[in-house]
Amino acid sequence: MTKDLAEDRVLRTTVQALVTGVSNRGVRTITAGGKTPVTKLSAYRIASLTKAFTSAATVLALSERAIPLSTPAIELLPSLAPDWRADRAITVEHLVGQVTGLRESVDGAAVAALGDGPDAIQEGARLVARAGSERAPGDRWSYYNGNYFLVGAILAGVTGVSYEDALAGALLHPWGLTRTGFETPAAVVEGWDGQISQPAETYPRGRRPSGGLWSCMDDLLSFAEHLLDHAVLLGETRRLRTRADDPTSYGLGWAIGPSGQMYLNGRLSGYRTAALLIPDHGYASFALANRTDALPEIARILSDLQHPFTGDDLTTRIDAFAA
């Protein structure tokens, strides 16, 4: 009954364009609601769901080159060494798991000011490394986009190509995600903040590793199905990198729920997105909304959809996650 209630909420939504998708051991169910017709191929900004892509691509790229996740980040970013003021013990694993202890002083505006040139991602990472650390790596989890600015630079560095090409080569192309990328598609779902339409602006290149992707429900479900089927990658992704007293249980790019769920949300002006996976059940779900204030609604829907599998109410956790 909970599943039926959740799908009924989608059909009765006041969000202009809301789409949810579920893959249950590869069997997909997609439900759309709102006044604007959308399909499994409609393009939405997925915001911080991008971190799950950056995380997966980095783990795959390093594994292919036999580079341990425990490698200190500075060893993989030698060009940043002269400006490195952060703790030199910070590893790739610390960065992707957001337990670095970095000083969180580099905001989106500072990175956007670097422009969109070929060095934007590396220079954004340089700002983060130059800002230093506030605590020892591993001491405490804290959601900070700066961690992923560095991860994006590492992915580019180890592959020898741009971050965007590295993401495509390690993940998007092999997994057949043909409608996921950083360039704004010709036709997108229009974003709304209240009654104000939000233009589809270019996302600053230096921030892309943390939140710049466009995608659609079809690609997102394919991404989740590949992740769930990749035993090594899934094992690394869902393994906790946090301590018992941390504010959030977190693996690599995903928060971890009480029954082993993996979840996260994304926020950009005009869009709210959320994802929830239950690896032990081969289950994945996503919700894409084109309204800034839609997170409480989509968090409730995703929680209700997974409730028959776990008995957990994750509405508050999904809604309160840090993105």
Image (cartoon, rainbow, N blue to C red):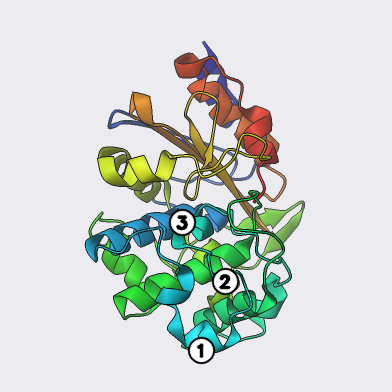
Q: What number is the disc on residue 117? A: 1
Side (left or right) of 300 relative to 39: right
How far is mark 3 from mark 1, CA to CA?
28 Å
Q: Is residue 197 left or right of residue 27?
A: right
Q: Amino acid at mark 3?
A: Glu
> Among all residues in the image, which is located at the extreme top?
1
As shown in the figure, which amino acid type bears the numbered disc 2?
Answer: Arg
In the image shown, does 178 or 188 lie closer to the viewer?
178
Question: In the rendered image, which residue does mark 3 sit on?
Answer: 93
Which residue is found at the position 68% from the left and 40% from the top?
247
Q: Residues within 10 Å of mark 1 (few under 14, many from 20)?
A: few
The residue under label 2 is 207
Q: Residue 278: x percent and y percent?
A: 42, 29
The image quarter containing residue 177 is bottom left
Q: Amino acid at mark 1?
A: Gly
- The quarter of the picture where residue 192 lies is bottom right
**Residue 4 as seen in the image, left or right of residue 198:** left
| Residue found at x 35% / y 24% | 281
